[in-house]
Amino acid sequence: MADRRSMYNDNKFKIGLFGPNCSSGRAVTKVPERWSGNWEGNLALAQMADEAGIDFLLPIGRWKGYGGDTNYQGATFETIAWATGLLAATKRITVFATVHAPLFPPVIAAKQFVTADHIGQGRFALNIVCGWNEGEFRMFGATTGAHEARYEYGQEWIDVIRQMWERDEPFDFEGKHLHLHDLVSNPKPWGDTQPLMMNAGQSPAGHAFAVRNCDALFSTPRGSGSVELLAEAVKKAKGLAAEHGRVIDVFSVGVITCKPTMKEAEAYYRHCVIDEADWNAVDSILAMKDVSPQTVGEEEYLRRRSHQAHGMGGIPIVGDPDAVAEKLIGLAGAGIRGMGISFVNYLDELPFFRDEVLPRLESAGLREPAARAAG
């Protein structure tokens, strides 16, 4: 598992691309150059990222759009098939699938994951989601259920999958939620190890699930623009894992606006996030999460509304290459293992980030040059 956990390279600070399987990515904006999310773009992006030494690709599990003027994230690719296709077309990058456990029967999921894992020769990884979007679950004739029960089900789901990967003889599984018989699955995951797993649950139940089962936790605590608050969250997660006799890496989420000058970066950020934001979609997202002036107070509501437009809660990182690199170096100093980043248009903006920011991170000792990234 050491190779899996390190994503097969020596980069101390991992960088991935988050959300390119969805139209508009993670920028709730109306600008015409926003990410289309089509297959041609995803394939070109994956191959560019692979050559640049980017460590991972992380999709969003989304089944319907958020409406608004752009129907934000209304066109999306299912993530297991997406990951499988991209693993076949790349050489060294780790590719995640983001899977809602209650919507994928574990027997089918176990087989799908192994298939992707063999195609990628061990580069497949899994982001487990237990669910929150009631509107999406209704599409499947399902309900999200009580918060605690989601993680109870998720625990049984992952227990079944792991046992199918580990056991050679047929077995039965009797749980509170799952009652399965004569379970068996071959082949096993690539190389007699199991895929890297992560979870992004932010609640106490979500954190407990992650430290019991996963190799990585995605954490973006409220107010995470503060390095101190993020460092506190990292310390808490690692301490909780240690109580369970485990080690867990903590990742976070960032939204990059990087231009040759600070003035250009700040102007483009304002253009996308304020002037051309899809505020109708933003309001729809907040309403689904029961965020309103009445539920969280006027000041907090306005803060969340502003922050939602660019990055769905990720850390905004805006500036010239020096400023962006400095911010990432500071976040690495807070103890996070890496960051999933997004752009307004991934394919257009990644080359500048690759050419200007990655070398600065290499000089800081956080990353290896791309030619040596495979170790």
Image: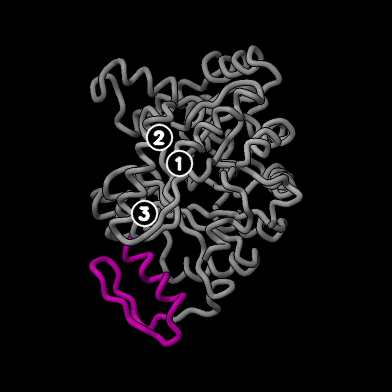
Q: Name the kind of residue labelled 3 in the image.
A: Ala
Vertical relation: 208 (above or below) 34: below
Q: Which mark is residue 335?
A: 1
Magenta-span inclusion, residue 339 = no
Q: Name the residue tied to disc 2.
A: 230
Which label's residue is closer to the chain start, 1 or 2? 2
Is the residue marked by circle 1 packed among few (<14), some (14-19), or many (20+) residues within 10 Å? many
Going 67% across and 26% down the picture, which residue do you hit? 33
Q: CA distance from mark 2 to mark 3?
A: 17 Å
Which label's residue is closer to the chain start, 3 or 1? 3
- Which sits in the foreground, 73 or 130? 130
Task: Give the structural element (helix, strand or loop) at label 1.
Answer: loop
Magenta-span inclusion, residue 173 = yes
Q: Position of residue 59 (x, y in %)?
A: 54, 47
Q: Quadrant of residue 184?
A: bottom left
Q: Are marks 1 and 2 in contact (CB under 8 Å)?
A: yes
Q: CA distance from mark 1 to mark 2?
A: 8 Å
Q: Start and end of the magenta stretch? A: 155-183
Q: Name the kind of residue labelled 2 in the image.
A: Leu
